[in-house]
Amino acid sequence: MAPTRSMMMDSPSDLNEFVMIQGNGVKGLYEMGLKTLPKQYIQPLEERMSMMTNKVVPQESIPIIDMSNNNNNCDVEDAICDAAEKWGFFQVINHGVPTQVLENVKDATYRFYELAAEEKVKYTKENSPTKHVRYGSSFSPQAEKALEWKDYLSLFYVSEDEAIATWPYACRNEALEYMKKSEALIKRLLNILMKRLNVKEIDETKEAVLMGSKRINLNYYPVCPNHDLTVAIGRHSDVSTLTILLQDQTGGLFVRTEDRRGWIHVPPIPGALVINIGDALQIMSNGRYKSIEHRVTANGSKTRVSVPIFVNPRPSDVIGPFLEVLASDGEKAKYKNVLYSDYVKHFFRKAHDGKMTIEYAKIT
Ligand SMILES: O=C(O)CCC(=O)C(=O)O
Ligand SMILES: [Fe+2]
């Protein structure tokens, strides 16, 4: 029997069957014409953006950095390192990734989600032929206090051949092209950030630990009924070294203020990319660069897509503060050495919980 709207509202197992097992995602819920939010998505009061405790600070903004060659390189470098130290988040323009490549990957995101559920379901945890390709909804359903209004396709990059053989046809060329064309930007950013840490050269070992593996996610946030009662992504910081995020013109990404009392909106800028420091780089820089909490609100009138590239250490790498950072002025290590795959496992074991993940690596 086809599920009805009222079944969906009342029964967690029917909802799970429809969203996850059949692969309809929250996109399917939206397309059913639900007028009220199923209770599984209702977030506790303190997590809702409409609460006073989650004050939006409209006068604040993260830095917007023009990376074009016309600018004094030293100014650009300083702006990037300052932003990484103070905000952990910034936007870049004139970054060298062609606008067409960005437009194409957004179109490809829509193309994937417009596939029939029977097609998308081939990539769920239960069905996917490879653990490197995963289609899902919400974050970590078993662990969450409440579900999130989000569908995702997560693609772990191993090699071009493997990507061509296993990534969904609807989006694989565009996702690969976006990864390839952002490589120079990633290297430039990491070189700049390393210089301030006294790391003079990114040799093979450093390159592996900084950017030895990559994951690209195609996020889809459909229009949401009673959007104030839920979130699209709960508070978290990324476990990456760096994240390169492409967002569309909808808006909804918020970053924690420095005093942790409020949230700053990251305004969409056509052609820009949002860059944020992840936990791995906070650890490697011994806390010099900040991995900041962020979240995404659900939208009551517009569908939103975003495409982050998570630049990560390899799962088998051990990460800890770089010796160059500690040597510079006899600084004490704030973090211990941890196996990166253990760190990531720790992140996925629990619900989105702001900045708690990094406690795992802290020396107390
Ligand atoms: O959609 C966004 O703007 C942010 C996504 C995000 O934070 C993530 O995927 O980790
Ligand atoms: Fe994130």
Image (spheres, helix red, strand yellow):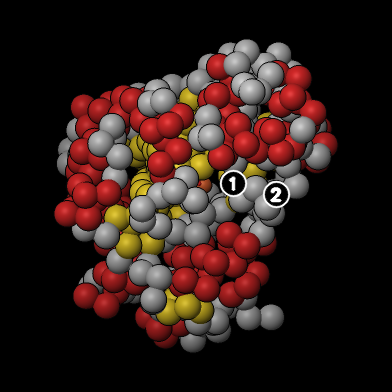
> Residues under labels 1 and 2: Cα distance?
7 Å
Identify which residue is drawn at 38% across, 33% down.
Answer: 119
Front-lying residue, 184 or 231: 231
Side of 29 where 157 appears, left or right:
left
Front-lying residue, 130 or 311: 130
Badge 2 marks a residue whose secondary structure is loop
Side of 37 where 274 appears, left or right:
left
Identify which residue is drawn at 27% across, 77% down.
Answer: 205
The relative height of residue 355 versus residue 306 in the rendered view (above or below) is below
Residue 225 position in % (x across, y down): 68, 19
Residue 46 placement: quadrant: top right
Mark 1 surroundings within 10 Å by alpha-carbon count, few (fewer than 14), some (14 through 19), many (20 or more) = many
Residue 2 placement: quadrant: top right
Q: Which tag, 1 or 2, sits closer to the chain's start?
A: 1
Please name the residue that numbered disc 2 is placed on. Answer: 144
Residue 287 in view of the camera: no
Residue 261 in view of the camera: yes
Residue type for callout 1: Phe
Please name the residue that numbered disc 1 is placed on. Answer: 139
Badge 1 marks a residue whose secondary structure is loop
Q: Are marks 1 and 2 in contact (CB under 8 Å)?
A: yes
Front-lying residue, 342 or 34: 34
Side of 311 where 135 appears, left or right:
right
